[in-house]
């Protein structure tokens, strides 16, 4: 596509914003693409190594304000990084990752260099829920070390994985974090009620976390998992502690999500909890 665009703003030597006849404003990224360029000049779409839209005004303002505070070479690195993530995920990324992940990694580098570390309490849940994103986040951390010489702490892997997950779904980071906090709360209730310490590396833990995650998704999609009255009655009689605990978890979910949870969820939660009880 050899379209000619009109330069609107040169952000630095490697990034500029141009007017597109169909998409309005387009961000063009490429080594030296903005060098000696001025507003109003024409530039070929093909000159860019990477292009993306900034439809959200807040994201556009954030990106414009962010670039003066980071080195131009870091933009080239981010371009390679995003190509790698997109290739590994096997799908296009939501445009907001250009702003969000650039912002996060730029300041994560500064924090790490100053030995300022943020703990990530949701690391086991993130690894369990988003294994592919987590693996790619590990690769990102390796790329940061290989090319920039900075070793990120383990918690950063989880944060990066969330950014990747957010970029391939319609969920915001805020929404994803809220769900992870709820899952962590539910697991803590299980441990407290059953008086056990769950092994976060165990298969049963991963199954429980993934089931809770899918249960939350079903709540938002108004899905149910089937009407199994006889099975529910049997489980209630055979495993009363786990069955009652499952309802305690459901009530917490209903309160936090402010939406009804299908009664059938109690059946599958009871089964997961009974597995944990047996292992304990």
Image (spheres, rainbow, N blue to C red):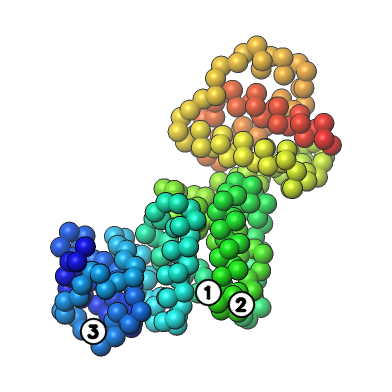
The structure residue drawn at horizontal position 37% and vertical position 59%, both measured from the top left corner, is 95
* Residue 143 vs residue 199, the one in the foreground: 143
Residue matched to label 3: 37
Q: Quadrant of residue 182?
A: top right
Task: Name the side, left or right, on which 137 lies relative to 33.
Answer: right
Circles 2, 1 touching at the beta carbon (< 8 Å): no
Identify the residue at horizontal 60%, vertical 74% (top origin). Answer: 145
In front: mark 2 or mark 1?
2
Give coordinates of residue 255: x percent, y percent: 56, 37
The Cα–Cα distance between marks 2 and 3, rounded to whole angstroms, is 33 Å
Q: Which of marks 3 and 1 is nearer the N terminus?
A: 3
Q: Disc 2 or 1, which lies upstream in sequence? A: 1
**Residue 255 visible in the picture:** no
Q: What element carries label 2?
A: loop
Q: Residue 150 shows which numbered tag? A: 2
Q: Cβ–Cβ below 8 Å for labels 2 and 3?
A: no
- The residue closer to the viewer here, 271 or 88, is 88
Horizontal relation, residue 254 to residue 249: left or right: left
Among all residues in the image, which is located at the extreme bottom?
Answer: 36
Residue sitting at 48 percent across and 60 percent down? 85
Give the CA distance from mark 3 to mark 1.
29 Å
Dot 2 or dot 3: first in sequence order is: 3
The C terminus is located in which quarter?
top right
SS at circle 3? loop
**From what the image shows, is residue 212 above or below residue 78?**
above
Judging by the rendered image, the residue that carries numbered circle 1 is 107
**SS at mark 1?**
helix
Q: On the image, which quarter does residue 33 sit in?
A: bottom left
Q: How crowded is mark 3: few (under 14 residues within 10 Å), some or many (20 or more)?
A: some
């Amino acid at each position: 596509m050899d379209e000619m665009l009109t330069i609107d703003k040169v952000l630095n030597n490697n990034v500029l914003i141009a007017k597109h006849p169909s998409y309005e404003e387009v961000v063009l990224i490429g080594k030296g693409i903005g060098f000696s360029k001025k507003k109003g000049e024409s530039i070929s779409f093909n000159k860019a190594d990477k292009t993306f839209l900034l439809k959200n005004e807040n994201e556009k303002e954030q990106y414009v304000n962010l670039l003066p505070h980071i080195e131009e070479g870091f933009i080239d690195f981010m371009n390679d990084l995003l190509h790698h993530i997109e290739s590994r995920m096997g799908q296009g990324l939501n445009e907001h990752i250009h702003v969000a992940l650039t912002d996060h990694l730029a300041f994560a580098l500064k924090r790490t260099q100053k030995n300022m570390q943020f703990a990530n309490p949701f690391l086991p849940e993130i690894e369990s829920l988003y294994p592919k994103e987590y693996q790619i986040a590990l690769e990102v951390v390796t790329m940061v070390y290989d090319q920039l010489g900075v070793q990120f702490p383990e918690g950063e892997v989880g944060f990066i994985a969330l950014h990747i997950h957010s970029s391939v779904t319609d969920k915001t980071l805020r929404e994803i974090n809220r769900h992870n906090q709820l899952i962590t709360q539910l697991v803590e209730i299980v441990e407290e009620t059953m008086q056990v310490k769950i092994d976060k590396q165990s298969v049963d833990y991963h199954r429980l976390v993934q089931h809770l995650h899918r249960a939350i998704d079903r709540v938002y999609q108004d899905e149910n998992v089937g009407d199994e009255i006889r099975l529910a009655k049997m489980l209630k009689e055979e495993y009363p502690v786990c069955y009652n605990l499952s309802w305690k978890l459901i009530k917490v979910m209903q309160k936090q999500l402010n939406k009804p949870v299908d009664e059938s969820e109690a059946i599958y939660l009871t089964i997961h909890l009974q597995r944990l009880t047996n292992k304990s």
